[in-house]
Amino acid sequence: EAQVTQNPRYLITVTGKKLTVTCSQNMNHEYMSWYRQDPGLGLRQIYYSMNVEVTDKGDVPEGYKVSRKEKRNFPLILESPSPNQTSLYFCASSPLGGVVTEAFFGQGTRLTVV
Amino acid sequence: KNQVEQSPQSLIILEGKNCTLQCNYTVSPFSNLRWYKQDTGRGPVSLTIMTFSENTKSNGRYTATLDADTKQSSLHITASQLSDSASYICVVSLLYNQGGKLIFGQGTELSVKP
């Protein structure tokens, strides 16, 4: 089954403790991205990657890092989490090329930083 | 500034009734417009995707329209069901040479009551 898998689904952590949220897709998609969703603000892009070893900042990259060492994986790293990073996070992937490409979203990771 | 505005913010309807959700956008360069359904705590799932040249597209009881001249789109839901209760998000995609970035609206929260 074609899917984007995020782990963990829920995470509670303390300020300053490094954490990684994993994202994996099995569709051989080139494009992967991370979003955060906050009430009243919609989804905002954090980082994106158009291929292996190619990453770029989205609209709200501060406090986050990513890496793309393999095509299928795109982990989101919070080196020193703060309470304002409490949010619902989504990973998405899509193929590149063509006029219209479908984006597939993971199930989400609800992060709470206390 | 690229923006997507949706109305209403929330809507309550009775099961079996029809409803229409609105989306206005100021996004350039425009590639395509998508409507997503997002169940509470889950990732968005695509309903329809329309390019510049398409002015209507259906997916079962969901029908989306696009007026590229006025930069407006609507999503019409026919014979609503309880399972239609969700957030509906309008998303506009930039052209591939702009990274294919997705610009999200804030969503319309639809509640279908028995």
Image (spheres, rainbow, N blue to C red):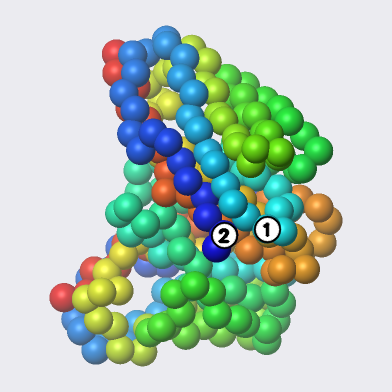
Picture quadrant where residue A26 is located: bottom right
Badge 1 marks a residue whose secondary structure is: loop
Q: Which residue is mark 1?
A: B28
Q: Is residue A6 above or below residue B3?
A: below
Measured in 3D between alpha carbons, the distance from the residue under mark 2 to the one under mark 1, in whole angstroms, is 7 Å
In percent of width and height, residue B108 lies at 40, 38
What residue is drawn where x is 33% and y is 34%?
A: B10
What residue is drawn where x is 55% and y is 63%?
A: B1
Badge 2 marks a residue whose secondary structure is: loop
Q: Is residue B22 above or below residue B63?
A: below
- Chain ID of residue with mark 1: B
Say whether residue B5 is left or right of residue A31. Answer: left
Could you tell me if residue B36 is visible in this image?
A: no
Amino acid at circle 2: Asn
**Disc 2, disc 1: CB below 8 Å?**
yes
In percent of width and height, residue B4 lies at 52, 50
Say whether residue A32 is left or right of residue A87. Answer: right
Q: Which residue is mark 2?
A: B2
